[in-house]
Image (cartoon, rainbow, N blue to C red):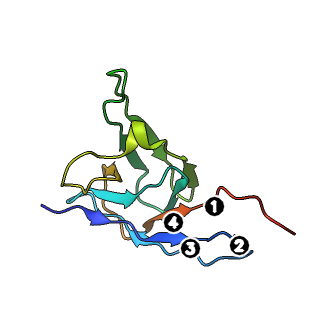
Amino acid sequence: MAHTVIALTDVGRDMKFGAQIVETASNSANDMSFVNDGNTILVVNNKAASGTAVEVTLLGVVDEHGRTQSIVETVAIGELRVFGPFPKSRWNEPGADPPKGTVRVNLDVSDADCEISAVKLSPAERNF
């Protein structure tokens, strides 16, 4: 089954103050993925007032040295967590499902109160 794509918010080279971040509802049945250029962070917002914590698994891929390691973290009720950025050689999927150049995210629970965002940051310096 196809992965649910996590909406990407590109704050652009100007990195605007107060950029609106697009959230995607969690989906544990299909897993999820986001486009990664190496300057992207993942934001997991467990907005639930009650219910359960969310276990997030970020699946690493085999790097140039043959190493692979996934990250497993718990996001408690009412907590917002930020992950990344994700170096492409360690995190980007090489195949078709999810698509090449994306990071795969697995969730242990599908909760309408858990929202996930991918935010692309600019590597350029800011001018204030």
Amino acid identity at mark 2: Asp
Q: CA distance from mark 4 to mark 1?
A: 27 Å
The mark closer to the camera, 3 or 2, is: 2
Q: Nearer the viewer, mark 3 or mark 4?
A: 3
The numbered disc on residue 122 is: 1
Task: Give the position of the C terminus as an image quadrant.
Answer: bottom right
**Numbered tag placed on residue 21 in the rendering:** 3
**C-alpha gap between disc 2 and disc 1:** 8 Å
Query: Which SS class for mark 3?
Result: loop
Residue 78: x, y in percent? 56, 59
Residue located beneath label 2 in the image? 14
Q: CA distance from mark 3 to mark 2?
A: 15 Å
Whichever of labels 2 and 4 marks the residue nearer the N terminus, that label is 2
Closer to us: 121 or 75:
121
The quadrant where residue 52 appears: bottom left
Residue 8, percent from left and from top: 46, 69
